[in-house]
Image: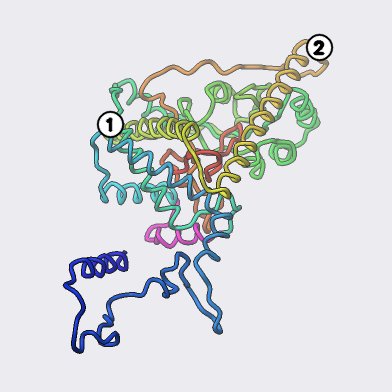
């Protein structure tokens, strides 16, 4: 700070002085240097500076910092920890994070956040609307936090690009082509927690009730139930949906309702609304763009792995000296552990209900079709697209524009209805 530097000059002058002065310079008033700051009596340099005054009352820095730290300090600390760990990992590899990398990350993120924005619409204004929207305290996101997230994601993207060694084959490109341009279907679904709920839904459908209306009442998926269980069109190779869910959907006739389909811990009834013909696009015309898409998907998956690794490393090594922040850290750890226990309890209960239902005869006329999801095969094209992560903003949207800050492919609501939380919980995690 300037006052420390100036104090050093004053001290140096006293050490090198040649005894008492005489003449006008010996007068204290004459000796007073207007550039030398009296640290001992200046309220701006006593460790708690005055930052505002009103009607003669001084407001000191600590009066603002203390409540800010208690309310939002932990989340910001986690963002900074994650950012610094990512940049440190880059430094260890001898890689520099340039301003252009962060600028490119910002452009890419805004493209993902506002991909449905109207032509000519100002994305920066949409971002401002998004950041100004009310959010829960643990999901608060300011422009400062957003900038830290961008810097973190840019560093992680650099790390991911350096770690990619998987070659993209023609088979991968063909699968991507079929996924994007092949024949597709539009379906409605009703998600249930157990076979008993499926039977209840089947009884309502057998009584002649409309599938969409039953979905609005009975479905467990909070995203799709509002639209009568309707999902965006998808192809047979669309990895945003479980493989067995896709396979059953494509096996149906238009207007037909499936039997019970088990996918990722939930149970579904699927109704095929419409078959859509393949798009008239030549493979060679889009081959380069398909390769770029696969490359981005692989990077997203690598970023996810790096984020998880750094998060675990932070949990193992993080030491917080501030009492308020340490208290919040302990509370987050406790809440996380309780959430894990609750999920395990729910999973055990669902398994128990499923096993019980499987051993009891049923008088329901409809055939029960239980299809478990087979293990996924590994290839460059099978790298799964991820939804927003832990450093991502919440699901609220400015105007009618979908927003997310995770550097990942945007997917339709998954049949499982899973969502992710943007703000860090117990460790750096996100998110872009």
Viewed as shown, does residue 18 lie left or right of 129?
left
Q: Which residue is label 2 attached to?
A: 361
Left or right of 312: which side holds 83? left
Q: Secondary structure at mark 2?
A: loop
- Extreme-front residue of the structure: 19
Which residue lies under the disc numbered 1? 162
**Residue 184 place in picture, x, y as percent:** 48, 31
In the structure shown, which secondary structural element does the residue marked by tag 1 occupy? helix
Write down the quadrant of residue 97 in the picture: top left
Q: Magenta residues?
A: 116-133
In this rendering, the answer to whether 380 lies above or below 24 is: above
- The residues tagged by marks 2 and 1 sit, at their Cα atoms, a distance apart of 56 Å
Report whether 251 appears left or right of 177: right
Is 131 above or below relative to 323? below
What residue do we see at 49% from left, 58% from top?
131
Q: Is residue 306 above or below residue 80?
A: above
């Amino acid at each position: 700070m300037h006052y420390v530097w100036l104090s050093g000059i004053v001290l140096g002058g006293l050490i090198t002085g040649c005894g008492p002065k005489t003449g006008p310079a010996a007068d204290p008033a004459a000796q007073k240097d207007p550039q030398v700051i009296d640290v001992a009596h200046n309220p701006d340099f006593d460790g708690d500076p005055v930052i505002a005054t009103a009607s003669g009352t001084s407001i000191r820095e600590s009066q603002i910092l203390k409540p800010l730290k208690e309310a939002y300090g932990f989340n910001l600390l986690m963002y900074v920890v994650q950012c610094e760990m990512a940049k440190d990992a880059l430094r260890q590899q001898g890689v520099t994070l340039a301003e252009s990398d962060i600028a490119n990350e910002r452009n890419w993120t805004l493209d993902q956040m506002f991909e449905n924005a109207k032509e000519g619409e100002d994305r920066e204004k949409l971002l401002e609307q998004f950041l100004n929207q009310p959010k829960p305290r643990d999901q608060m996101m300011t422009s400062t936090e957003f900038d830290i997230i961008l810097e973190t994601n840019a560093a992680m993207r650099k790390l991911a690009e350096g770690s990619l060694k998987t070659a993209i084959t023609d088979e991968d490109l063909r699968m991507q082509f079929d996924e994007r341009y092949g024949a597709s279907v539009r379906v409605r679904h009703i998600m249930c927690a157990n076979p008993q709920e499926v039977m209840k839904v089947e009884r309502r459908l057998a009584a002649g009730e409309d599938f969409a209306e039953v979905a609005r009442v009975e479905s467990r998926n909070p995203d799709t139930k509002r639209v009568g269980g309707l999902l965006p069109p998808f192809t047979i190779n669309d990895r945003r949906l479980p493989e067995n869910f896709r396979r059953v959907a494509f096996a149906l006739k238009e207007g037909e309702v499936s039997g019970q389909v088990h996918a990722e811990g939930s149970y579904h009834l699927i109704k095929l609304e419409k078959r859509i013909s393949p798009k008239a696009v030549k493979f060679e015309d889009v081959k380069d763009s398909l390769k770029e898409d696969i490359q981005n998907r692989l990077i997203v998956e690598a970023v996810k792995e790096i984020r998880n690794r750094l998060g675990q490393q932070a949990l193992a090594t993080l030491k917080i000296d501030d009492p308020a922040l340490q208290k919040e850290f302990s509370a987050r750890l406790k809440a996380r552990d309780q959430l894990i226990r609750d999920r395990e309890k729910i999973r055990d209960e669902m398994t128990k209900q499923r096993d019980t239902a499987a051993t009891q005869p049923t008088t329901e006329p409809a055939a029960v079709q239980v299809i478990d999801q087979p293990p996924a095969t590994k290839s460059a094209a099978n790298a799964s697209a991820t939804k927003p992560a832990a450093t991502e903003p919440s699901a609220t949207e400015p105007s009618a524009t979908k927003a997310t800050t995770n550097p990942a492919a945007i997917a339709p609501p998954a049949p499982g209805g899973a969502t992710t939380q943007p703000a860090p919980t117990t460790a750096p995690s996100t998110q872009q």
